């Protein structure tokens, strides 16, 4: 009998398997697709030689992840590549706000009236960032806080809505960039603890940047898989699990799946019936004949570029997708251009480009024209650079990754109490009513992103259970 079976080879499933194998448990991992990766894959989606990331492409949380930093992933081929600027947010007039490793450079891009306010917001946390990140991403109760005072101070700043936090700013550059940071988790700007979302992304960028993985996000998954195999773990792909009886006998089963799928497979009935899925996304991967022709020079120096004219436009786009059940007329876009630092992603002189906007969960329309008109506002002539595009709405994204229910790439709405208490109100979110079944996906704390911490935290719950006397 195996000690542990893991279902789902996304970053969290892989991390959970690695953590358990490191502690001497026998582990086997089962994945329905033909390769590992989940939300961290790389594929030729458009033309030969153009290597795209079907989901996550830039990794501020990955490079800062306590779980990843404790593993020898560089030995297995993972290399982080950093652009001159971590992130840029251009405006229609050709100017831009930036998120840089330097707090001073970032603050200066906001203008003199907001530079001091931004520095006062982030600088107190940076010297203690590593401890704060571990405490924040290890909650709830998987580890005692190492610096409870800093964590409490962070909570006071971050628990209110982001709209409260941004009241300290006078001008749009700071308000807009921060609104864009919050929108990465598709949460309405006025939601509980959305200030913490923006702060985490800002602090992560200042601490270690906003990199891409050389060769694509698949490098993260391949590094985890390579390490797992060296630890003696087994990986089985092309293996769809429909019920627990499809799996070999084991002392524990860990699911990197949506709560909906786990309940169906493990026979948990309506245990997760109240779990809410959030807005979907409409994503386009482009093959370009050259770099994106951004008007703002700063946008040409960053791998990640946020698109939204101002904080009101971003807020309206989020409300349309999350609350009003319609696609926004001017969507907020998150874009990634890996070729700024990684020439391996496309043939010489060519580029891959990645963009998505928010739409209602399960939306069936086509946002291509609307997205490209939005891009043209900030990069005139963009459409002239397009060689090919691969379009994926909510249905296509869900078919590509079963965890993205209705196109929700965060595997659950990041709003209200569910932003922090997911997949249900519990002091032990990784356990289920079945004593041998656990969940480790992005539906558990600390939530969405390629960081492996949900898997890391779930692995702790598993090994504590396995160490208990029979």
Image (tube, rainbow, N blue to C red):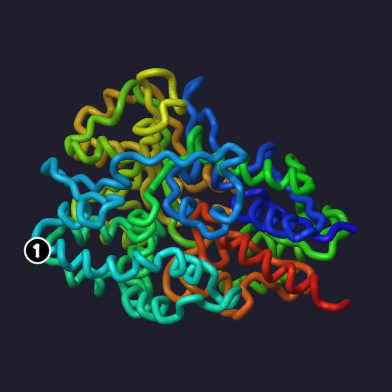
**Residue drawn at point x = 34 percent, y = 25 percent:** 386
Residue 456: where, in percent of width, then height? 62, 62
Name the foreground residue: 273 vs 125: 125
- Name the secondary structure under disc 1: helix
Name the foreground residue: 71 vs 228: 71
Residue placed furthest toward the front: 127
For disc 1, the marked residue is 113
Name the foreground residue: 202 vs 448: 202
Relative horizontal placement of residue 24, taking residue 305 as reference (left or right): right
Image quadrant containing the N terminus: bottom right
Question: 164 above or below 260?
Answer: below
Using the rendered image of the protein, determine whether residue 305 is visible from the camera's viewpoint. yes
**Residue drawn at point x = 37 percent, y = 22 percent:** 350
Residue 123: where, in percent of width, then height? 28, 66
Residue 450: where, in percent of width, then height? 52, 52
Name the foreground residue: 218 vs 358: 218
Relative horizontal placement of residue 215, taking residue 310 as reference (left or right): right
Which image quadrant is residue 453 in? bottom right
Residue 460: where, in percent of width, then height? 67, 68
Question: 77 above or below 322?
Answer: above
Which image quadrant is residue 360 in? bottom left
Using the rendered image of the protein, determine whether residue 408 is visible from the camera's viewpoint. no
Relative horizontal placement of residue 94, taking residue 56 as reference (left or right): left
Q: Residues within 10 Å of mark 1 (few under 14, many from 20)?
A: some
**Residue drawn at point x = 22 percent, y = 27 percent:** 381
């Amino acid at each position: 009998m195996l000690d542990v079976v893991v279902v789902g080879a996304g970053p969290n499933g892989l991390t959970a398997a690695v953590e358990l194998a490191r502690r001497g448990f026998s582990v086997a991992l089962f994945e329905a697709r033909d390769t590992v990766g989940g939300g961290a894959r790389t594929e030729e989606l458009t033309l030969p030689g153009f290597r795209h990331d079907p989901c996550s492409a830039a990794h501020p949380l990955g490079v800062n992840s306590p779980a990843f930093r404790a593993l020898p992933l560089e030995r297995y081929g993972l290399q982080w590549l950093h652009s001159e600027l971590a992130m840029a947010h251009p405006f229609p007039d050709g100017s831009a706000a930036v998120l840089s490793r330097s707090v001073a450079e970032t603050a200066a891009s906001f203008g003199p009236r907001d530079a001091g306010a931004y520095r006062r917001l982030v600088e107190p946390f940076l010297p203690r960032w590593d401890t704060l990140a571990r405490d924040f991403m290890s909650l709830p109760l998987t580890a005692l806080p190492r610096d409870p005072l800093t964590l409490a101070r962070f909570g006071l700043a971050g628990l209110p809505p982001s709209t409260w936090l941004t009241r300290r700013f006078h001008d749009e550059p700071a308000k807009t960039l921060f609104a864009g940071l919050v929108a990465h988790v598709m949460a309405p700007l006025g939601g509980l603890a959305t200030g913490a979302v923006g702060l985490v992304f800002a602090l992560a960028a200042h601490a270690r940047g906003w990199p891409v993985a050389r060769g694509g996000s698949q490098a993260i998954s391949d590094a985890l898989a390579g390490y797992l195999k060296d630890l003696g773990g087994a990986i089985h792909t092309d293996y769809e699990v429909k019920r627990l009886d499809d799996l070999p006998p084991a002392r524990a089963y860990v699911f990197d799946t949506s709560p909906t799928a786990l309940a169906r497979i493990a026979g948990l009935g309506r245990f997760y019936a109240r779990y809410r899925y959030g807005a979907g996304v409409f994503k386009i991967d482009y093959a370009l004949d050259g770099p994106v022709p951004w008007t703002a020079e700063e946008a040409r120096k960053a791998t990640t570029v946020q698109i939204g004219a101002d904080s009101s436009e971003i807020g309206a786009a989020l409300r349309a997708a999350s609350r009003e059940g319609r696609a926004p007329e001017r969507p907020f876009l998150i874009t990634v251009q890996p070729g700024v630092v990684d020439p391996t992603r496309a043939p010489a002189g060519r580029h891959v480009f990645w963009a998505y906007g928010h739409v209602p969960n399960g939306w069936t329309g086509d946002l291509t024209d609307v997205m490209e008109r939005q891009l043209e506002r900030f990069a005139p002539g963009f459409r002239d650079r397009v060689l090919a595009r691969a379009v994926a709405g909510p249905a296509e994204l869900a078919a590509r990754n079963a965890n993205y229910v209705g196109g929700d790439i965060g595997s659950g709405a990041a709003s209200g109490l569910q932003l922090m208490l997911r997949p249900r109100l519990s002091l032990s979110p990784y356990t289920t009513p079945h004593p041998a079944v656990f969940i480790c996906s992005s539906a558990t704390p600390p939530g969405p992103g390629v960081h492996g911490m949900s898997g890391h935290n779930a692995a702790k719950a598993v090994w504590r259970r396995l160490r208990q006397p029979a």
